[in-house]
Structures are given as C-alpha cells and as structure tokens.
Amino acid sequence: MKTKQIGYRAVLTFAILGLAVGGLAPSGWGQPAAAAAVEDLSQGHGIGFGLGITAPFTPPNTFPASGLSGRIWIANLFGVEASLFVVDQAPSLSLRGFLKYVNTSVADLYLGTGAAIFGSDGTLVVPLQAVSGLEIRLTPNIALAAEVGLLFRGVSEVTAGLAIHFYL
C-alpha cells in the first residue's frame, strides 16, 4: 500500500511541478519562433519617374521607348506607363499597361501591352508591343526594370528594355 501512495504522490508532484513551470514559462515557450516580418518594397509606392532604353533602336521596325517615363502601379496589381522619347529629331510617345502576375517583397513579374506613336521618314508609325517584365526593388523608392517582348507592325520583332524608376 505504501508503494501505491508513493506512486500517487510522485505523479501528483510532477503534475503540480509541470503546471507551475508551465505557468512561469514565457508565453510562446516551446513553440517555434515566429518568422520575421518581411517588408514588401513594392507595396504602396506612388508615381515613379525614370529613364529607359529599348532595343532595337532604328525605326520604323522598333518600339522606341528610350527616354523619360512615368509609371504608376494601381492597387499594386495594375500598372500604367507613359514614355517620351525622340525619333528622327521629333518628339514621340508610348503608352503601356501592365498586369503583375508574381508579386514578391523584392521582385515583381508582369505582362504588358501598349503602342508607340512616332514619325519616321515622313510617315506616322504606330507599332504595338507585348512584353514580359521583371521589376526589382533596390529600396522602397528605387527599382530596376528589365523587359523582353515582341513588337507588331506588319512584321514581328523581339524587343528588350532596361529602365530605372524613382518612386515618390
């Protein structure tokens, strides 16, 4: 009978000790550490201004968006860009729209389409473009963008571009 009493006492003692230690332990003790919060550098930025260069360079079979550009992301999903550039010593314009399909804290992948309007050898040229791009955030206000796409103007040709944008 004494062994049964010692057994009960031992179990009761360990149970009380366990509750006491558990009650004194810091909250979250024994649970995995929470992951550090990662800042999404592309979230909530304003209008971006930048410089870009797009190849091929020689009109008319080109999508010349080499020059100054303004870009804004709406709801961190849809983007709109307008670029001003010079072709054959005349001001020109391109307008494009984007849709993000991968949005991470540092890099975003997007698809886009648009049109450029410029003159070449006395004729008005309006090529269309379909593009896939990668925007990499260096800081919350500075991003690099690299793009590869196709232009359409009777012929199809591969385009490539590189830009830097400063977001307000």
Image: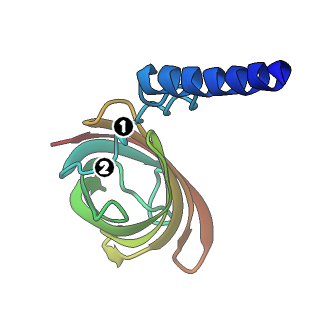
Residue at position x 82%, y 26% in the image: 4
Return the residue at label 2: 43
The residue type indicated by label 1 comes to: Glu
Give the quarter of the image for residue 38: top left
Q: Residues within 10 Å of mark 2 (few under 14, many from 20)?
A: some
Using the numbered discs, state the Cα–Cα distance from disc 2 to disc 1 in whole angstroms.
9 Å
The one of 116 and 18 positioned closer to us in this rendering: 18
Residue at position x 68%, y 22% in the image: 9
Height in image: 35 above or below 46?
Answer: above
Return the residue at label 1: 39
**Residue that protrudes farthest toward the front in the picture:** 1
Q: Residues within 10 Å of mark 1 (few under 14, many from 20)?
A: few
Q: Is residue 50 visible?
A: yes
Taking the image as shown, residue 157 lies to the left or right of residue 5, namely left
Height in image: 42 above or below 75?
Answer: above
The residue type indicated by label 2 comes to: Gln
Q: Position of residue 36 (x, y in %)?
A: 44, 30
Residue 102 is marked as none
Height in image: 106 above or below 109?
Answer: above
The one of 13 and 106 positioned closer to us in this rendering: 13
* Element assignment for label 2: loop
The one of 55 and 111 positioned closer to us in this rendering: 111
